[in-house]
Image (cartoon, grey):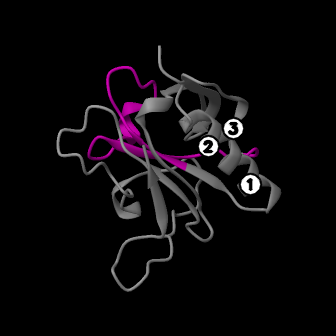
Amino acid sequence: MGLPSTKPYLLRAIWEWCCDNGFTPHVAVDVDENTRVPREFVRGGQIVLNLGPTATSKLQIGNEFIDFQARFNGIARELSIPVERVSAIYARENGAGMSFEIDGDSDGDAADFVDASEVTELSEDPLPEPPRPEGGRPKLQRIK
């Protein structure tokens, strides 16, 4: 048996860093059949979710799943996201964060970042694009 994944530990650490520094943590998720999110907000097989303390209730970032409650259009929903389906976690305000490869991506080039214009978040505020360097990609570090 191999070592457990570092991914859930990194997700918790970046979430805490965002909250400690007054930023709003967001996760980009590649939705599959095991991902429990409101399907009407999924765009192109992906969704971006605000995981900030004011946007969620009963948030648990476990080693296998991220579970929480959130409101969509005023309706409380139970969400459950497999940690393996999270492609990025970042601060909404400045784009600082980390991207991850998604297990099962056949091209080996998992989403470095989800285009904010193609996804919906929990809050009523529009999701700003993260800062992008000259190459056009956000400054996120990819890990396995």
Residue 115: x percent and y percent? 36, 61
Q: Which one is nearer the viewer's eye here, 104 or 35?
A: 104
* Marking on residue 89: none
Between the residue at mark 3 and the residue at mark 2, the CA separation in whole angstroms equals: 19 Å
Task: Name the amino acid, label 1.
Answer: Trp
Q: Residues within 10 Å of mark 3 (few under 14, many from 20)?
A: some
Which contiguous range is marked in magenta? 27-54
Q: Residue at x 37, y 86 (%)?
A: 134
Q: Which residue is mark 3?
A: 56
Q: Secondary structure at mark 3?
A: loop
Residue furthest to the right in view is 20
- Between residues 39 and 87, which one lies in front from this camera angle? 87
Amino acid at dot 3: Thr
In this orientation, does residue 78 appear?
Answer: no
Indicate the secondary structure of the residue bearing disc 1. helix
Q: Few, some or many C-alpha atoms within 10 Å of disc 1 (few <14, some 14-19, many ≥20)? A: some
Residue position marked by numbered label 2 in the rendering: 10
Q: Which residue is mark 1?
A: 17
